[in-house]
Image: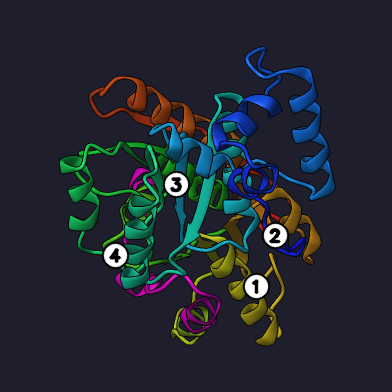
């Protein structure tokens, strides 16, 4: 037997000249298998460093016990923290997880979904790509009886269960903070308008302006893609205005750090010339200069809540549930002007 390949129960059974079920029972110390055979099986398993394949074992039992996760990318702390929360809850309940990424592409998102279905996952946790405007590939899961829960970026309409941040209120409070600390003209940099998360955070920003009787100026609101390059371009557009903003609210990590870079490249001081607030995680906010005031998410808790909701749907097909996880505005050096 080749030792550089993954060793299966079938490999062990063939070398011992017994059935796969005999090997499986022996490894589980079943009393149906004599002590001599149990020891022979275990010795061979140790020799080849056999490790059980939970996916294959699940499929043999016709009970996959696998949860699929679909995220826009795998490299940010935001999504890795959510995945950690999902994975821990899944493991506690006897499930394994498979993680896929759309890399912010609609077509790849559809392919990832097909791959998860083909693996026969019991349920799927998903966050939309920035390109997604057609949700029919998710709707098709209903006819296949596969439970689905969205997190962070979700389908509009409340058709599926979801776990999100308090997007409207967090943006309203962030904008209110800028106004209370000396800013008067606040720009907003967001993502594509078809995304519900963009719609909600923009709404919170505009609501704060209305509550403070500040005229809404369309030229101060730029919503394109949520990428670093788009964030640089959006900030350049704002700074080139005849009456530029003296503060910016950026709605995710990439946009916030892009805005900071572009502001500095114009030799402007943060927050004296332009105050800045982002949506980002605790770690990166403290690594930049000045330290970034930011709306921070309870990402691990979002992952836990998402997985618990999916498991509830797997056990019993429940009506859609919408869960909102509070955020925190952590005030640092980038937002408070000297009054």
76 up-or-down from 96: above or below: below
Question: How far apart, in angstroms, are the residues tagged by discs 4 and 2?
Answer: 33 Å
Q: If the image is split into quadrants, where does the C terminus sit?
A: bottom right
Question: How far apart, in angstroms, are the residues tagged by discs 3 and 1?
Answer: 36 Å
Tags 4 and 1 touching, CB below 8 Å: no
Which comes before the other along the chain, label 3 or label 2?
Answer: 3
Image coordinates for residue 138, horizontal then vertical, percent: 25, 51
Can residue 165 be spotted in the picture?
no
Which comes before the other along the chain, label 3 or label 4?
Answer: 3
Q: Which residue occupies 48% across, 42% down? A: 170
Which residue occupies the extreme front position in the image?
17
Which comes before the other along the chain, label 3 or label 1?
Answer: 3
Question: How far apart, in angstroms, are the residues tagged by discs 3 and 2?
Answer: 39 Å
* Segment colored magenta: 205-234
Residue 260 numbered tag: 1
Image coordinates for residue 22, horizontal then vertical, percent: 60, 29
Q: Which residue occupies 69% across, 62% down? A: 5
Q: Which residue occupies 36% across, 45% down? A: 120
Q: How is the image coloured?
A: rainbow
The residue under label 2 is 334
Q: Relative to residue 336, is residue 214 drawn left or right?
A: left
Tags 1 and 2 touching, CB below 8 Å: yes
Question: How far apart, in angstroms, are the residues tagged by discs 4 and 1?
Answer: 28 Å
The residue under label 4 is 132
Q: Relative to residue 321, is residue 137 drawn left or right?
A: left
Question: Which one is closest to the eye, mark 3 or mark 2?
Answer: 3
Residue 68 numbered tag: 3
Q: Relative to residue 91, is residue 124 drawn left or right?
A: left
Q: Secondary structure at mark 2?
A: loop
Front-most of residues 237 and 90: 90
Tags 3 and 1 touching, CB below 8 Å: no
Instruction: Confirm whether the magenta stretch covers residue 206.
Output: yes
């Amino acid at each position: 037997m080749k030792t550089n390949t993954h060793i299966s129960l079938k490999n062990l059974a063939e070398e011992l000249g017994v059935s796969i079920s005999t090997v499986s029972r022996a490894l589980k110390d079943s009393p149906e298998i004599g002590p001599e055979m149990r020891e022979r099986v275990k010795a061979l398993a140790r020799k080849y460093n056999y490790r059980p394949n939970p996916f294959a074992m699940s499929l043999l039992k016709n009970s996959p016990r696998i949860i699929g996760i679909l995220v826009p990318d795998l490299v940010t702390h935001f999504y890795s923290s959510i995945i950690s929360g999902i994975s821990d809850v899944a493991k506690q309940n006897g499930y394994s997880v498979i993680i896929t990424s759309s890399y912010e592409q609609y077509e790849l998102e559809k392919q990832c979904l097909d791959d998860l279905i083909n693996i026969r996952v019991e349920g799927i946790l998903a966050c939309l790509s920035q390109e997604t405007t057609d949700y029919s590939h998710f709707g098709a899961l209903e006819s296949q009886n596969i439970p689905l829960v969205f997190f962070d970026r979700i389908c509009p309409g409340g058709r599926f269960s979801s776990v999100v941040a308090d997007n409207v209120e967090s943006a309203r409070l962030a904008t209110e903070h800028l106004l209370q600390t000396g800013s008067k003209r606040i720009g907003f940099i967001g993502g594509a308008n078809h995304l519900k998360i963009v719609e909600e955070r923009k709404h919170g920003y505009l609501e704060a302006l209305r509550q403070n009787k500040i005229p809404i100026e369309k030229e101060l609101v730029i919503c394109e893609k949520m990428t670093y390059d788009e964030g640089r371009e959006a900030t350049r557009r704002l700074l080139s205005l005849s009456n530029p903003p003296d503060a910016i609210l950026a709605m995710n990590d990439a946009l916030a750090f892009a805005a900071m870079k572009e502001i500095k490249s114009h030799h402007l001081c943060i927050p004296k010339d332009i105050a800045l607030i982002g949506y980002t995680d605790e770690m990166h906010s403290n690594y930049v200069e000045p330290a970034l005031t930011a709306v921070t998410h309870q990402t691990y808790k979002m992952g836990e809540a998402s997985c618990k909701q999916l498991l509830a749907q797997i056990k019993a097909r429940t009506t859609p549930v919408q869960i909102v996880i509070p955020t925190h505005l952590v005030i640092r050096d980038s937002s408070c002007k000297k009054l």
